[in-house]
Amino acid sequence: MAQPSKEPCKKEACDIQACLSKNMFDSRKCVRVIQLLQSCCEQCEYKSTHCGSVSGLLKNISK
């Protein structure tokens, strides 16, 4: 059986960085991947170091 990752949501966080880099750091163009990170963080009860920035990213989208 596979071991659960010690860093859940790492893939989603990396996907956000790639999306932001590709889109000149316009978070509005990366809403889908940001939502995927938020969903992952909710599933792991925010027990990942990668979940600390998701709320800030979500605030930036609404601007």
Image (cartoon, rainbow, N blue to C red):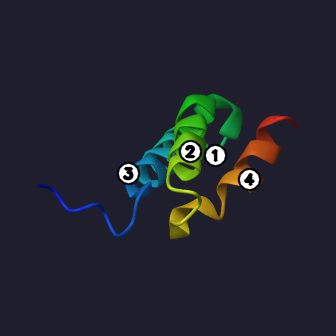
Amino acid type of disc 4?
Answer: Ser
Q: Which residue was labeled with disc 3?
A: 11
Task: Determine contact: label 2, label 1, CB under 8 Å.
Answer: yes
Q: Which corner quadrant holds the C terminus?
A: top right
**Disc with the residue nearer the chain's start (4 vs 1):** 1
Task: Determine contact: label 3, label 4, CB under 8 Å.
Answer: no
Front residue of 60/9: it is 9
Task: Determine contact: label 2, label 3, CB under 8 Å.
Answer: no
Local packing at callout 3 (Cα closer than 10 Å; few below 14, some 14-19, many 20+) is some
Q: Which residue was labeled with disc 1?
A: 25
**Disc with the residue nearer the chain's start (4 vs 2):** 2
Which labelled disc corresponds to residue 38?
Answer: none
What's the distance in space between the residues labelled 2 and 1, CA to CA?
4 Å
Circle 3: element type:
helix
What's the distance in space between the residues labelled 3 and 4, CA to CA?
17 Å
Amino acid type of disc 3?
Answer: Lys
Which labelled disc corresponds to residue 20?
Answer: 2
Front residue of 21/41: it is 41
Q: Residue at x 66, y 53 (%)?
A: 54
Q: Position of residue 22 (x, y in %)?
A: 49, 40
Amino acid type of disc 1?
Answer: Phe
- Dot in front, 1 or 3: 3
Left/right placement of residue 22 relative to residue 5 reads right
Amino acid type of disc 2?
Answer: Leu
- Dot in front, 4 or 1: 4
What's the distance in space between the residues labelled 1 and 3, CA to CA?
18 Å
Answer above or below: position of 28 versus 43: above
What's the distance in space between the residues labelled 2 and 3, CA to CA?
14 Å
Task: Determine contact: label 1, label 3, CB under 8 Å.
Answer: no
Left/right placement of residue 40 relative to residue 31 reads left
Task: Determine contact: label 4, label 2, CB under 8 Å.
Answer: no
